[in-house]
Image (spheres, helix red, strand yellow):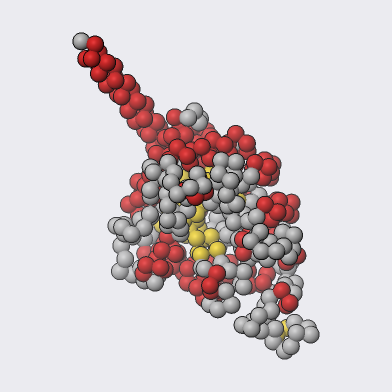
Amino acid sequence: MLAEFVVLCLWFGSCAVTEAEDASMTRALKLMSETPLIDGHNDLPWQLRGQFNNQIKELDLHTLSTTHTNIRKIKQGRLGAQFWSAYVPCQTQYKDAVRQTLEQIDVIHRMCEKYTETFMFATSSQESESNQIASCSEIHIPNDFLLLRADNWLVDTGSEPSRHNGLSSFGKQLIGEMNRLGVMIDLAHAPLSVMNQVLDWSKAPVIFSHSSAYSVCPHRRNVPDEVLVRVNQTGGIVMVNFYNDYVTCSKTAKLSDVADHFDHIKKVGGAGVIGFGGDYDGVSRLPEGLEDVSKVPSLVAELLRRGWTDEEVKAALGQNLLRVMKEVERVRDSLNSSMPDDVPIPYKEVENPCRTSFGYQNAGNEFSLSRAALLLILILQAGVTFNT
């Protein structure tokens, strides 16, 4: 009789847990239908390059099974907008970085054109709130061409002797040009000195598109508490990365470990600085329970079980990032009477056997466009208004 009573109690306890989990998931899905998820970083375009050499004509993105991301998983994950990474590796520097970057931007456009019922290329905060999956380009390229990401500017990364004490003079110059053009500044790969310098220099808020909390996992890719406070003060956002190595500083992790980062960032920086930046298809190890894009609602349900309010969850899902995007646009509009910064980077800082020097005085007879001009060219080519 006692054994039957114990079994019955365990059964009722199990039912109570299951009902609570179901209630949290139901609530999560409702919130995600009202405020669709905006994710800060996905490397599917690089997988399309690596696996198919960007040949997507015969490819079915609805059922693609070799990636973390396909259209079926996107819909299950309630994704509303995605920043696709137009990444090319550092090996392209001094070689074909420009061509490969343009090809990665092109494959994002072609993906949107092939699946018009699902994707729409977005160039404004308003378009990012459409009923289709809004697609934005995040340009991530070597420092020979354009320096749109902070890790690609002439900065001191900590992996070699310091040359600039953080940002170079041209890096500081480029911040102003990005503000003028309405390009969001992404500090996801930046060292601490550069994080603070950009927060000092930029007129517009910045993003960390796929970084987590340093106090939870002390990895250099994560954001220290003192910077979280500054992100709050300047109206920016930190979009939590799911890569195991940045979540637990080890090879393994669980969904609850990712939720710990959300909790810590909210505690230190406030609910207004948090977003999602899964890094799907750009990493080799993901937490148990977050194995692909379709699993994100489970994380939202976990936050609700931890006492997050509906308003806090909606802010993290997309409202925080939309606020940042609108402020970047406002700063751009306030600078619309400013002339472009066309002062070229000093030739000695970019001199190499594969670069000509036309236009530079006392540097031969070769010609070189300023990087600021190249920045404008790439943005016009990409059709990007504010995404890095």
| Residue 142 found in image quarter | bottom right
The quadrant in which the C terminus is found is: bottom right
What residue is at 62 percent from the left and 36 percent from the top? Answer: 268
Pinpoint residue 298: horizontal percent, then vertical percent.
Answer: 39, 39
Q: Inspect this view and state whether residue 239 appears.
A: no
The quadrant in which the N terminus is found is: top left
Q: Is residue 72 left or right of residue 252?
A: left
Pinpoint residue 4: horizontal percent, then vertical percent.
Answer: 21, 14
Foreground pick, 54 / 133: 54
What residue is at 53 percent from the left and 74 percent from the top? Answer: 92
Total numbered circles: 0
Q: In the orientation shown, which residue stands out farthest toward the bottom?
A: 365
Q: In the orientation shown, which residue stands out farthest toward the right?
A: 362
What residue is at 79 percent from the left and 85 percent from the top? Answer: 362
Q: Inspect this view and state whether residue 63 appears.
A: yes
Q: Is residue 8 left or right of residue 317?
A: left
Q: In the orientation shown, which residue stands out farthest toward the top?
A: 1
Pinpoint residue 44: horizontal percent, then vertical percent.
Answer: 42, 60
What residue is at 37 percent from the left and 33 percent from the top? Answer: 26
Foreground pick, 193 / 56: 193
Pinpoint residue 360: horizontal percent, then vertical percent.
Answer: 75, 82
| Residue 232 found in image quarter | top right
Reply above or below: 11 against 324: above
| Residue 343 found in image quarter | bottom right
Foreground pick, 321 / 188: 188
